[in-house]
Image (cartoon, grey):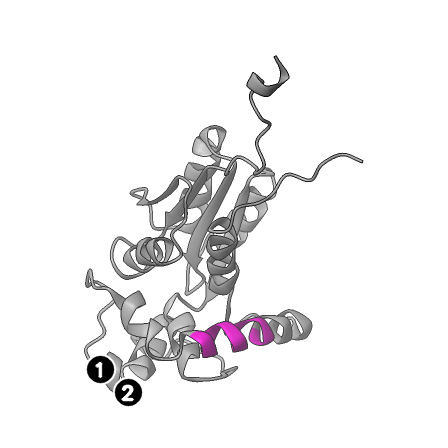
Amino acid sequence: MAQFDRSKPKFKQQPTVLVICEDTKSGKRYLEDASLHFRVKVQVEIMHCGKTDPKGIVAEAINRQGKFDRVFCAIDRDTHKNFDEAQALVKTSKKVELIVSYPCFEFWLLLHFGYCRKPYAAAGKYSPADLLIKELQTHECLQDYDKGKDRNIFELMLKNGFAEARRVAPKVLAEAIASGDMNPSTRLHELLDFFEELSQPQPIKSAK
């Protein structure tokens, strides 16, 4: 009888998502905690694949993409020599997407304290990322910041300018693209926006 027919689902099945990080500590822990914050009700596997160069990370993502609907590679530009090769390789896949920070993930954290478009260049023994981290440490809440620490930075920054970072990051990225100079900029906000989108049930549009 009709009343016993199984009703059609009202919401789309959530996609499976893989996020591969470049570092094993700060960036990886940040994205794990962010996915928990947004209560992402999908398979979001955040891992360090044993490779720290952009091309190696993209190759690993392409190798594993068959099990997932979307794959993100969160990488730093910094001074990686095969970065351009990674950008070319990612174009061979329709599932894999780069989430790049120039010069590094910590630029996203710096945006919690306001707009910034000052470029970072290597100086002496210090890489662009080293210099940015030194600047990040001038802020009281991050004086002891260490990229190698497994610490809940997400929870800390949620209380210290998270909304500001999400507000200014798209503006910084748009200006970087328009100028042709991506240093500094980040796409981290796009990944966090995606997490937030996934946390909301997506209704199935009925055919008219």
**Could you tell me which secondary element the residue under label 2 belongs to?**
loop
Residue at x 46%, y 37% (from the top left corner): 16
Q: Residue at x 31, y 66 (%)?
A: 154
Q: Position of residue 130 (x, y in %)?
A: 31, 74
Left or right of 1, for residue 126: left
Nearest to the observer: residue 88 or residue 26? 26
Range drawn in magenta:
163-172
Secondary-structure class at tag 1:
loop
Most distant residue in the right direction: 208
Q: Quadrant of the C terminus?
A: top right
* Magenta-colored stretch includes residue 164: yes
Residue shown at 57%/45% (left/top)?
A: 202
Q: Which residue in the structure is indicated by mark 2?
A: 138
The percent position of residue 86, horizontal first and vertical second, equals 51, 48
Label 2 sits on what residue type? Thr
N-terminal of the two: label 1 or label 2?
2
Describe residue 26's horizontal placement relative to residue 208 as left or right.
Answer: left
**Which residue in the structure is indicated by mark 1?**
143
Mark 1–mark 2 CB contact (< 8 Å):
yes
